[in-house]
Amino acid sequence: MKDGEITRVLQRIEQGDAHAAEELLPLVYAELRRLAAARLAAEAGGQTLQPTALVHEAWLRLGGDAQPQWANRAHFFAAAAESMRRILIDNARRKKAERHGGSLAKVSASATGFDVAAPEADDEELLLINEALEALAAHDSRKAELVKQKYFAGLTLEEAAEVLGISVRTAKRDWAYARAWLFNEIQRLRGSA
């Protein structure tokens, strides 16, 4: 992928070129699909989303062919990562609601006469991580954004540092801090659950 070409197309979008948005998706598709595949590979086996579907949904949420103005490549990929994160969270919430009966009436498992397996904890874990991440964002937004880029978008620490406009050394410090902070927050949330 040619970063300069992406930047030029993003600049044309900013200048109001109606055809530039149509050129953007082919330029960024492979990178977005790689990020989506990396993120979904880290998900539980029961994941119903495929990388292609995640990219397409993220593209639509970003505006589709009516792209908003992007400051630069980093701004675009940060927005794409956030969009993918929100899609995964929405999907986990939807599946959790379905597992917990949605609009169905609750019936005791003992009343049915057979055992009911406990719901998968993976979506629960994703929602817990999201709640902790929102708390981190309120505490330190840059560190939360680094986690989003690394955890949800699947970027390397070096790529995330580039997207965020920080040095790799700062990214490493932020990552160590964020991991420890999130660990403590998740432990706290589990205790209150």
Image (spheres, rainbow, N blue to C red):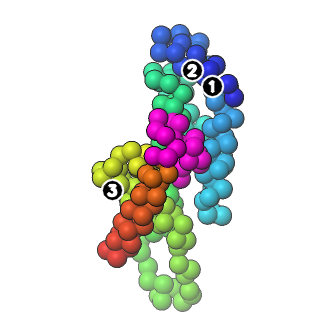
- Label 2 and label 1: CA atoms lie apart by 6 Å
Vertical relation: 109 (above or below) 20? below
The quarter of the rendered structure image containing the N terminus is top right
Vertical relation: 21 (above or below) 138? above
Residue at image coords 65%, 50%: 38
- Crowding around mark 1 (Cα neighbors within 10 Å: few <14, some 14 to 19, many 20+) is few
Residue at image coords 47%, 88%: 111
Q: Which mark is residue 7?
A: 2
Vertical relation: 130 (above or below) 1? below
- Label 2 and label 3: CA atoms lie apart by 33 Å
N-term-proximal mark, 1 vs 3:
1
Residue 11 is situated, as x and y percent measured from the top left of the image, at 52, 15
Residue at image coords 51%, 63%: 123
Q: What stretch is highlighted in magenta?
A: 148-170
Residue 178 is situated, as x and y percent measured from the top left of the image, at 42, 57
Q: Does the magenta stretch include residue 152?
A: yes
Identify residue for label 1: 3
- Asked if marks 2 and 3 touch (Cβ < 8 Å), the reply is no
- Crowding around mark 3 (Cα neighbors within 10 Å: few <14, some 14 to 19, many 20+) is some
Q: In which quarter of the image is residue 19?
A: top right
N-term-proximal mark, 2 vs 3:
2
Q: Can residue 77 be seen in this view?
A: yes
Q: Is residue 68 visible?
A: no
Vertical relation: 143 (above or below) 181? above
> Which amino acid, mark 3?
Ala
In this view, the mark in front (1 or 3): 1
Identify residue for label 3: 135
